[in-house]
Structure formats: structure tokens, C-alpha cells
Image: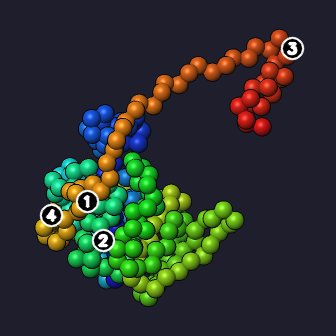
Amino acid sequence: MKIIVLVKQVPDTEEERRLDPVTGLLDRGANECVADEINERALEVALRHRDANKGTEVVALTVGPASATAVLRKALSMGADSAVHVVDDLLEGADIAATARVLAAAVQQAGFDLVVTGNESTDGRGGVVPAMVAEHLGLPLLSSLNTMEITPERVAGEATVEAGNLTVSALLPAIVSVTERSAEARFPNFKGILTAKRKPLATLSLEDLGVIPHGGGANSTVLTVSERPARTAGKKIVDDGTAAKDLADFLVASRLI
């Protein structure tokens, strides 16, 4: 079985993220860039299956700038068998539509039985790329799984919905996204870090994939950008005997009760 895990380089979520006021795009140079944690959980799901099932191959795949190689190297050090990096200047500022199209072309060229990814990235938080990739490939999508079980013929898992939990399944090949309730990612060990340097990492361009996104990397245009307003000071209630009433009035005025 061949499992492709989609990974992504994102600005560190522990820091304040900013938009470039000129381009309207995320300013990736304002913060240190790291591997998205939700994709590391997706990788962990694939690695656990590989550890228990000999003959399984795990491939990490990303679309991003040259710096995103570091994310793939970490995936390799965690245990992925190989990696694929789609990098092209035409993808600068790529929106979710262009990104999904390129991801679909890359996984199709690589060949796979199962694609696993996070349910949404921590930078854009669009949450629709897995569905768009599935649509491009004409495959079933099991979205936002908390648990997952993989067999040679199918994939199944449990997803949380408003009314409770759903148990869902699909025949392979399929696309699956996982939530933060899925397996916690392992840390790369010393042996993994050393062997990662010898594992194959292929670099592909849009020409290699036979894909040229319409209008370059973006199918959408940012018209305006505005800074988030600074937080104002809260209201202080001093207990002079009427604090309970003042607090109740404040909650009612704020439509909190």
C-alpha cells in the first residue's frame, strides 16, 4: 500500500501572523516557518499503519517555496520513506483553488492508494483543500476523522458532527483528513534525523506536472487589507453594593445572557 501524506509549511502559530499590506497575502517572512502540526498528526496516522503493516510506503508531499524543504526533511526524519516537493515561481501567492489543482496532479503522478492530510491548515484555515483534491481526482473523501482504521481494501473512521459521532468508510483509493483528536505526532529520533538525509526527495515543477494554474498561482484577488483594531480596555466593575446588578446589566447589554 502507498500512502501519500500532504504536509505544509506555515508561520509559527505561537507568534502573531500578519498580512502584507501591499499584496494582501500572508507575510511568511514575518515569523519563523514550521511544519503544520495537524499535518504531522496525519503523518503519524500513516506511520503507525506502516509500522504494523510491512510493505506499506509513506510519502510526504508539499507544495511551497524552496524553504518548505525543511518540512519534508522533518517528515523524513519522523519516518516517511520518501518526499515530493512541488516548487515553482508561478505558485507564489497560490490560493486554495490553484493549490488543490496542483496537489491533485502531484499525487496522481506519484500514484497512491490513500491520501491523508489535516482537516485545515493553521494559516489559512480554509478547510476545503482536501475536498477540492478529492473532487479533482473523482475520489471519496472522509473528512475530519478523529480515529482511522486502514485495511487493504478500505479506510474507516469516526467523525464528530453536531448531533453526535458518525462512523464512516470508503473503498480505496480515497482521500482522508484528520482532526487534532487524531494520533499525536512522534518526535524525530537521532537515527531518523541521520537517515533522513539519505532518503529520496524529488523536486517537481508545474511543467513536470503538466499543470499551469489559470492566472498564475491565484484564481482570486485580494482587494483591500486592514489591520485588526487594537483591543480596548475592558469595563471595571467596583463592588459598592451594586456589582451584581451592574454585572448582569453588562452581560445583557453584551447579549451574553
| Mark carried by residue 63 | 1
Q: Amino acid at mark 4?
A: Ser
Are dots 1 and 3 in contact, CB under 8 Å? Answer: no
- Circle 3: element type: loop
Seen from this angle, which residue lies furthest left?
207
Label 1 crowd bin: few (<14), some (14–19), many (20+), radius 10 Å: many
| Mark carried by residue 241 | 3
| Mark carried by residue 205 | 4
Residue 105 visible at all: yes
Up the image or down, 208 lies above or below 78; here it is: below
- Comparing marks 2 and 1, which lies closer to the viewer? 2
Disc 4 and disc 2: Cα gap in Å?
14 Å
Q: Position of residue 87 (x, y in %)?
A: 18, 58
Disc 3 and disc 4: Cα gap in Å?
70 Å
Disc 2 and disc 1: Cα gap in Å?
11 Å
The residue located at (63%, 65%) in the rendering is 161
Disc 1 and disc 4: Cα gap in Å?
10 Å
Q: Amino acid at mark 1?
A: Val
Q: Amino acid at mark 3?
A: Gly
Q: Amino acid at mark 2?
A: Ala
- Circle 4: element type: loop
Q: Is residue 177 left or right of residue 35?
A: right
The residue located at (44%, 71%) in the rendering is 176
| Mark carried by residue 104 | 2
Up the image or down, 59 lies above or below 220; here it is: below
Up the image or down, 36 lies above or below 174; here it is: above
- Circle 2: element type: helix
